[in-house]
Image: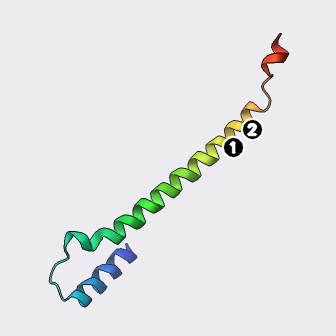
């Protein structure tokens, strides 16, 4: 929210526009998508590491007979 307010004020001051256009929000959307993808990747890595710990104690197919 702080970034959004700061970016909005700076863009408005630099461009001299009364209202922001649709393209003025592009950097904010890019940052949001980057953070969302990063959090998703970290969540998947964490779930895979938990799955590895769980499946480590399971017997291999050769041991089952």
Check disc 2 and report its element: helix, strand or loop.
helix
Locate residue 23, reporting x and y percent: 24, 71
User: In what quadrant of the picture does the C terminus appear?
Assistant: top right
Using a 10 Å C-alpha cutoff, classify the residue at mark 2 as few (fewer than 14 neighbours), some (14 to 19) or many (20 or more): few
Q: Nearer the viewer, residue 64 or 9?
A: 64
**Is 34 placed above or below 18 here?**
above
**Which quadrant of the view contains residue 21?**
bottom left
**Which residue appears at 40% of the width and 63% of the height?**
32
Check disc 1 and report its element: helix, strand or loop.
helix
Judging from the image, the colouring scheme is rainbow
**Which residue appears at 31% of the width and 69% of the height?**
26
Locate residue 31, reporting x and y percent: 42, 67
**Is 8 placed above or below 37 here?**
below
**Which residue appears at 65% of the width and 41% of the height?**
48
Q: Which residue is mark 2?
A: 53
User: In what quadrant of the picture does the N terminus appear?
Assistant: bottom left
Using a 10 Å C-alpha cutoff, classify the residue at mark 1 as few (fewer than 14 neighbours), some (14 to 19) or many (20 or more): few
**Is 53 placed above or below 28 here?**
above
**Is 37 placed above or below 57 here?**
below
Locate residue 46, reporting x and y percent: 63, 47
Q: Whole-Å distance between the Cαs marked 1 and 2?
A: 6 Å
**Which residue appears at 18% of the width and 89% of the height?**
16
Callout 1–callout 2 Cβ contact below 8 Å: yes
Q: Nearer the viewer, residue 51 or 65?
A: 65
Q: Which residue is mark 1?
A: 49
Seen in the image, is 53 located left or right of residue 42?
Answer: right
Locate residue 28, reporting x and y percent: 35, 69
Q: On residue 17, which mark appears? A: none
Seen in the image, is 42 located left or right of residue 1?
Answer: right
């Amino acid at each position: 929210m702080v970034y959004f307010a700061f970016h909005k004020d700076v863009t408005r001051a630099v461009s001299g526009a009364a209202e922001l256009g649709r393209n003025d929000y592009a950097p904010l959307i890019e940052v949001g998508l980057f953070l969302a993808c990063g959090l998703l990747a970290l969540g998947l890595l964490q779930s895979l590491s938990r799955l590895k710990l769980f499946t480590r104690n399971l017997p291999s197919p050769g041991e089952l007979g």
